[in-house]
Structure formats: structure tokens, C-alpha cells
Image (cartoon, rainbow, N blue to C red):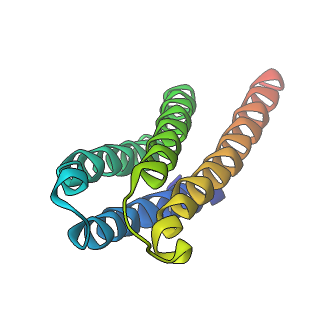
Amino acid sequence: MIQRIQSIYLFLVTLFNVLAVFLVANILENQADAVASFEYEYQLYFLIITLLALWAILSFKKRGFQMLLGRLNFILNFVALGFLIYWLLILPGEIQFSEKGIGLVVPVISIVFIVLAQKAIKRDDELVKSADRFR
């Protein structure tokens, strides 16, 4: 069902990744042209992660498929975290760390909420399987 706790967790993943799209756009807009050329790739990547989370929310009737989407989203968030760490290391200039590193927080928070959603989906799946044994 849509009102389950895993849907709330996945909605928070969606919300944080939409926030990441705007954070990356805002930070990269103030940088050199060589680094700003990656702006659209990062935004597209975070939008893909957002769409996967929305798809996982809407596939609440298929718990197995929802878990698969959650695992895929988990992997993509780790890749996004790697991209952002690489981006942080190649950024030129003397920008304050909080401005450069704020984008790193978003994939970490998303990973935490994805793990919580995966645990809730698994718990629901086990509950349904145990109820099926009694029939």
C-alpha cells in the first residue's frame, strides 16, 4: 500500500535527490567552465535516481520488484557518491568546504533511507508469506 513506511522512506529519497539536482546546478553554475560542463550529466543522473524511487513507490503491489528497484537505486546512489567525491577533489578554487561538500550529504542520506525502505519491504514480504502459510 502507498501509506506504508517504505513509501515514506522512498518519498524522502525522491525529495533529497530533487534537492541534489538543484544543489549541483547551483554550485556548478558558479564554477569554471571546464567543471560546469558536467552539470547536465549530474542532474540527469540524480533525476534517474529520483524516477527509480518514484517507480519503487508506485510498484507497491510487487514487493519483489520493489526490492529490486531499491537495490538498483542503492547501487546508483553509491555511484553518485563516488562521482561527487571525485568532483569534490577536482574542483578548482578556494571555496569553503561547506559549499563544495553539501552535495555529498544527499546521496548518503538517500542510501540510509533506501536501506530503511529495503528492511521495511522485506518485513512486509515476510509477513505476507507467514500469513499465506495459514491459509
In this view of the protein, which residue sits in the foreground, 42 or 124?
42
51 relative position to 101: left or right: left
Residue at point 23%, 48% (across, down): 38
Q: Is residue 96 left or right of residue 43?
A: right
- The extreme front residue here reads 93
In the depicted structure, whether residue 83 falls above or below residue 22: above
x then y, percent, for residue 115: 68, 45
Asked if residue 76 shows in the view, the reply is yes
Q: Position of residue 10 (x, y in %)?
A: 52, 55
Question: In x, y percent, where is residue 55?
Answer: 37, 43
77 up-or-down from 7: above or below? above
- Residue 83 in the image: x percent, y percent? 44, 42
Residue at the spot x=51%, y=40% of the render? 82
Give the quadrant of residue 45: top left
Horizontal relation, residue 111 to residue 42: left or right: right
Question: Which residue is depicted at the point 55% across and 72% down?
Answer: 97
* Residue 126 occupies quadrant: top right
Q: Identify the residue at horizontal 46%, vertical 67% (top origin).
A: 100
Q: Nearer the viewer, residue 72 or 55?
A: 72
* Quadrant in the picture for the C terminus: top right
Along the line of sight, which residue is nearer the eye, 119 or 106?
A: 106
Please indicate whether residue 127 sits to the left or right of residue 63 in the image.
right
Number of on-image labels: 0
Residue 6 appears in view: no
